[in-house]
Image (spheres, rainbow, N blue to C red):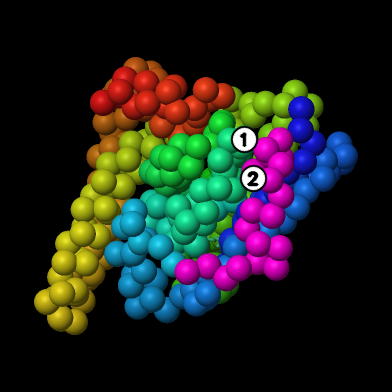
Amino acid sequence: MSRRAVVYLYTQTGQLREVAEAFVAPLEADGWRIRWVDVQPRVAFPFPWSVRQFFGVFPRAVDPDALVELAEPAGGFGAERDEQEVVLLAYQVWYLSPSLPIRSLVAGHPEIFENRRVISLIACRNMWYSAAIEVAGLLRTAGARRVEVVAATDTRHQAASLVTTLRWLLTGKREPFLRFGRAGVGDAELARVTAVGRSIAGQGNCPADAAPIVPMLAAADLFAGRLFRNWGVTVRWAERYGAAAYAASLVMFVFGLAIGIVAGLPLIGGAALAGGARFETWISGAVNRRISLGESTVQEAARHERAIQ
Ligand SMILES: Cc1cc2nc3c(=O)[nH]c(=O)nc-3n(C[C@H](O)[C@H](O)[C@H](O)COP(=O)(O)O)c2cc1C
């Protein structure tokens, strides 16, 4: 098996770098050679975000065709044409989609992924499912040979992680406050990601739990992902009718989002409970089929797509 990997990484707070380092540590200990390529947009996204910027990026984030220009890294994007080198694609989720710089990398530089084994390394709050499906589609189009997913999330209670993540993104403060813990991916998740890296170094494969699927979150994510993309179309359409129409459509999104979180999530949670094991099997299958590709890729992926339609 190849003992070389390249990590493509864009991170605002450094969280994703921590997760990627946790993943590659056992590979390095096993003698793997790791290259790091920093992905940076030409025009930086803000951090911390202002409320206006945070919601203002929504229409582009959920538009599968929206790309940003990337700064060319010193050695170029795909310097080594070594097809045995494993590609680690580290990304975070923005509004249930891959972040704009990473979507731009995959859509704009398919040659990096062509005929390669790609391991996606996701770090986000807890909803990564629709984003992973979008990225798998892009990687399939790019001709990736094999795609696997490793996901690290904030495993605290939904409501708590919503508060701490928003506070972190809008103020830059990540540390515990009041009764809330530290925002973001915790130590137990980092340890789990290291165990996944160890498994790749040892047996060459991702373990089955590399990206644990939480049925209720997965169902909410797939449902909301579709709504987000449709609402994004509405916001971009409203933009043509001036600043007031644009602002109104965004405000409606924010209210809709709040209602969805307060009322929609418990509803889906109730449905998930009622559906029991059958629901879990169905949603896990639906997600797994769409986020990963096997060795024979294109034909196999097409078969998967047909099977779930
Ligand atoms: C604009 C924006 C939207 C986000 N949307 C989501 C989301 O839909 N689901 C999620 O789990 N996390 C979401 N997050 C959290 C990020 O995935 C990520 O955890 C956080 O931005 C820190 O990542 P970084 O420092 O590696 O860039 C969002 C963050 C931003 C900035």
Query: Range of the magenta residues?
Result: 69-87
At label 2, the amino acid type is: Leu
Residue at 62% from the left image edge and 35% from the top image edge = 117
Place residue 248 in its image quadrant.
bottom left
Instruction: Tell me if residue 76 is in the magenta stretch.
Output: yes
Q: Is residue 154 visible?
A: no
SS category of the residue bearing label 1: strand
Q: Position of residue 241 (x, y in %)?
A: 12, 77
Q: Nearer the viewer, residue 135 or 161?
A: 135
- Main SS of the magenta part reads loop
Q: Is residue 6 above or below residue 51?
A: above
What is the number of the mark on residue 117? 1
The foreground one among 230 and 84 is 84
Establish if 91 lies above or below 176: above
Percent coordinates x, y for residue 89 in the rendering: 59, 48
Query: How many other residues sit within 10 Å of disc 1, few (<14), some (14-19) or many (≥20)?
Result: many
**Closer mark to the observer between disc 2 and disc 1:** 1
Q: Amino acid at mark 1?
A: Arg
| Residue drawn at x 45%, y 28% as measured from the top left | 298
In the picture, the disc for residue 88 is: 2
The local secondary structure at tag 2 comes to strand
Total number of numbered discs in the rendering = 2
- Identify the image quadrant of the C terminus: top left
Q: Is residue 143 above or below residue 106?
A: above
Is residue 45 something one can see in this rendering? yes
Q: Residue at x 69, y 45 (%)?
A: 81
